[in-house]
Amino acid sequence: MDISNVKRSILAVIGIVLILLIIIFSVVFIMVKQNNLSFQNPVRIRENPTVTYTVGEADYMGKNLSEWKELEIGTVLKEGESLRTGFNGIIDIRFSNGTVMKVIEDSFLSLNEINLDAIDVGLKKGGIISKFTKLFSSQEYSVKTPSMVAGIRGTELIINTSEKGTDILGISGITEVYNPLYPDNRILLGFQTKTEVLTNQAPSNPVALTEEEVSYSRNMLDSINTNKVIVIGKAIQFKPDTAEIVEESRIELE
């Protein structure tokens, strides 16, 4: 075998590959310059928070409105709106896939910020049961009460607040907790632990949840409706010996 011929063949192949690479890079460069080709981050689509379930006294008020309106299943919530529940009032809200919240009775809550990068909820009184799932690392979730700020990294939480202070139960994940009066005194609330943040004090050291608290918390979290649930308050009546619904029941269904 003539070694010189082999070397010439290898060099010829290398030359052809280099020429092809130069042509490809040149085409890509020209297309980018002409805006025919662009490189973008993955598309992110924001979901509007939607009421999936409500019962009892439950109202909302828009950012620029002065009167409360009754909440209905399917109501789409917006940034700046406020929610309140009264006697036996419950509201389930779906923010996005994996991020849902239940507002318990006698609560007042404000949606301070809702966008692709952040969810900021203000809980002025009452309580919430919530699941937060980050869709990408730069998202920021927070819940604020008069005595506490919770920076959420992706977790399941139960938060109750009153004039005395705020109790927060961490069922999973990690949450940074502090009193806005003492911003330098912060704790990390971890898996199945709880803390108390009194009005004029820094958060207490986390302690482990009891088995009863874990069981109760899990049942409450599992009770959040992630999809719309329609509740029919009356029995649906049909005309005798037919499948035709009577007019009164038709109104109820509508």
Image: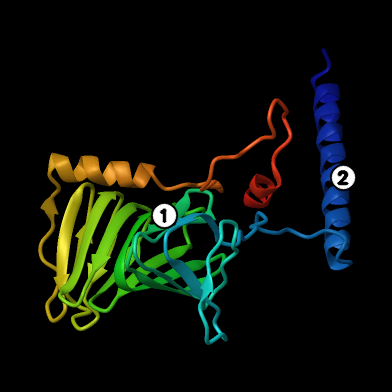
Contact, CB < 8 Å: mark 1 with mark 2? Answer: no
Residue 53 point in image, percent of width and height: 49, 53
The amino acid type found where label 2 is placed reads Ile
Left or right, residue 228 beside residue 107:
right
Residue ranking furthest to the front? 240
| Residue that appears at 57% across and 71% down | 78
Q: Which one is nearer the viewer's eye here, 159 or 19?
A: 159
Q: Callout 2 environment at 10 Å: few (<14), some (14 to 19), or many (20+)?
A: few
Q: Which one is nearer the viewer's eye here, 106 or 87?
A: 87
| Residue that appears at 18% across and 51% down | 193
Examine the image and state in which quarter residue 40 appears: bottom right
Residue 194 point in image, percent of width and height: 17, 56
Examine the image and state in which quarter residue 2 appears: top right
Q: Is residue 12 above or below residue 53?
A: above
Identify residue for label 2: 19
Residue ranking furthest to the top? 1
Q: Which one is nearer the viewer's eye here, 73 or 131?
A: 73
The amino acid type found where label 1 is placed reads Phe
Residue 88 point in image, percent of width and height: 35, 59
| Residue that appears at 80% across and 29% down | 10
> Of helix, strand and loop, which one carries label 2?
helix
Judged by depth in the image, the label closer to the viewer, 1 or 2, is 1
The quadrant of the rendering that contains the N terminus is top right
Residue 27 point in image, percent of width and height: 88, 54
Q: CA distance from mark 1 to mark 2?
A: 52 Å
> Of helix, strand and loop, which one carries label 1?
loop
- Dot 1 or dot 2, earlier in sequence: 2
Q: Callout 1 environment at 10 Å: few (<14), some (14 to 19), or many (20+)?
A: many
Identify residue for label 1: 132
